[in-house]
Image (tube, rainbow, N blue to C red):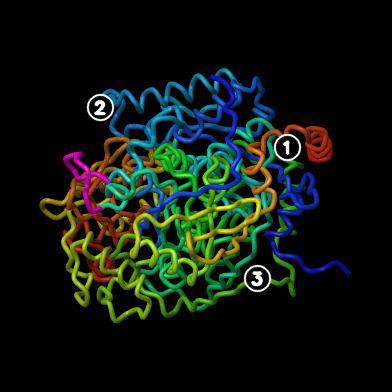
Amino acid sequence: MTTPTTLFEKVWNDHVVREDAGAPAMLYVDLHLVHEVTSPQAFDGLRARGLRLRRPDHTVATMDHSTPTLPRKLAVVDPQGEAQLRKLKENCAEFGVSLYDLDSAEQGIVHVIGPELGITQPGRTVVCGDSHTSTHGAFGALAFGIGTSEVEHVLATQCLLQRKPKTLEVRIDGTLPRGVGAKDIILALIAKIGTGGATGHVIEYRGTVIDALDMEERMTICNMSIEAGARAGMIAPSEVTFTWLEGRRFAPKGDAWVAAVARWRGLKTDAGAKFDMSIHIDASTLEPMITYGTNPGMGIPVTGRIPGPESTENPAERAALGKALDYMGLASGSPIAGQRVDVVFIGSCTNSRIGDLRSAASILRGRKVAAGVRVLVVPGSKAIKAQAEAEGLDVVFRDAGAEWREAGCSMCIAMNGDQLSPGQYAVSTSNRNFEGRQGRGGRTFLASPLTAAAAAVTGSVVDPRTLMGGAS
Amino acid sequence: MTVEARVPFTTLASTYVVLPADNVDTDQIIPARFLKVIDKRGLGQNVFADWRLRPDGTPNPDFPLNRPDAEGAHILVAGVNFGCGSSREHAPWALVGWGLRAIVAPSFADIFRQNAMKNGLLPVEVDAVVHSRIVEARHVDAKVRLTVDLPAQTLTLSGGPSAHFDIDPFAKECLVHGVDELGYLLDRAADIERYEAKHP
């Protein structure tokens, strides 16, 4: 009888090319996603060594981080951003990489288009020079972010040297209350274990609540695994996964599809397999979540109060809390609800998919954005933009007074001109609330699309459940 | 462009700077607006830009790297989970560009640790007791030095005891000999071919 193994171990074991004593494993990469910000130095490295790209057929590029989200003819030309985009185009042409550039109908955020194209598949290893590569783990892939040196290693050899991470089971059972979704689950987990809580581990999300999530919700959860410090996050593929993937452009077809699904059904943790660590969350106890501080672990229910120094015995944590509240301009003990909001950003690889846009639109339909509040809605890909427009969601957003933009990372990383001004408060559906993340001096509250849309309407942090059920 | 020869890392003796913060994220180490580059050089001038410089571009005199006694220090001592956040290798490029060669902290984020070691920047993980001893010593004397001996895996405070630190033995070999991992992978191309033949 074979030893029971976890989902992670199955995918890992399938990809070990070689493992020498004392050295990390050589891990084979099935899919290498490339974008303009973390790749130019890697392509330069290949050229400097006179190396070819080993598997252009396993390499796919898009433009997302430095890309304008205004219609191209209106976009402010940023010479540095333009140079980066031009360099990516040249590198892809020289090395034979498929590129979904700004003119492509399939352009979008790298972690949105991988699944959309059907190249993110269960059991694959997926890497990208971007920490939110963990998103693809929602399909039962082993997916993680790498630095530019490693991008070069993968370009040249299709392999990475990796120590085997540990495993962390996150089991989420119970019944998800109304108004509580995937973003709230992951923010609650990070608030519980902290931004370093899963360092060195690959998380497997399991339990009845996870089983019931759709693919987009699963992607939202896996996406923010890195915010808990995890190497990757994974969810075992199920019928939900297969239904979502079937018929996508690069998904297997015909007999190959049948064979693939049969193989993918085996990608699950065996009964009796051991995890290095386990955490359990009862979803029934969760509420809509929001962050109040300067790292994603500083999260509370939207009905909660901002913690004070008495919330921790640890002097370093106490100092960090004081520093965070000082930056945020918030007072300990006051409710987070009612806090003024200047900007609402709905987008990013965490929450820019069609379900996220529908969720935001359910609040904004028939309502107006509060006076003085700027709302940006940035779809994750051109395909999502087209679908949203086919459903009339763009009209809902525009009628409410929101800006409807082109696909890209936009205000999540604020590299493209979409950014906060110093001192502004934003409710953002993105993944990081670090100081200055959305523009120097900007102050970010991370939340779900529902909570973000509710803040857009009221101009302040508000419990979205009070606005559910449509405009009165 | 030529392939850069990596400087071997054996021992380093230097004064040090304490950055008293936990969870220092890569957006602080180098804000995203400085990532719009296609080269890895010149990023040192942007390290900790939003903490080191005021909005008007003048140095913030309170930031530890700006204090006169930080001059010539090649070691930064910081709090837990240093380098959390994004995978940007621009973070170690910027730290190295500023002149730092080692970061001492109770823990590091995974991707940052990997990126640092690939750029000759040594992450030295120490326990809380050693960490506070180092921080305290710096409060008493800004001239106090730390010696990092990578082959021996020891960290020594001048006039104080040595502490052992752990490091991945493979990464250590690469650092000590100034070689990178790509050569190792390229030397094993036959294994990659065999794997690919079995996994079409």
Above or below, B159 relative to A223: below
Q: Are marks 3 and 2 in contact (CB under 8 Å)?
A: no
Residue B30 visible from this viewpoint: yes
* Chain letter of disc 1 in the image: B
- Which of the two discs, 3 and 1, sits closer to the camera? 1
Q: CA distance from mark 2 to mark 1?
A: 44 Å
**Residue A82: x %, y % from top left:** 36, 24
Q: CA distance from mark 3 to mark 1?
A: 30 Å
**Residue A281: x %, y % from top left:** 50, 76
SS for callout 3: loop
Q: Write the start and end of the magenta stretch as one range.
A: B51-62
Front residue (pair A152, B98): B98
Q: Is residue A77 left or right of residue B136?
A: left
Residue type, numbered disc 3: Asp
Which residue is depicted at the point 45% across and 49% down?
Answer: B14
Q: Are marks 3 and 1 in contact (CB under 8 Å)?
A: no
* Chain letter of disc 3 in the image: A
Residue farthest toward the right in the current orientation of the protein: A1
The number of callouts visible is 3
Which residue is depicted at the point 36% across and 42% down?
Answer: B47
- Residue hosting label 3: A276
- Residue hosting label 2: A76
Is the stretch drawn in magenta largely helix, strand or loop? loop
| Label 3 and label 1 in one chain | no
**Residue B45: x %, y % from top left:** 33, 36
Question: Residue A448 falls in which quadrant of the image?
Answer: bottom left
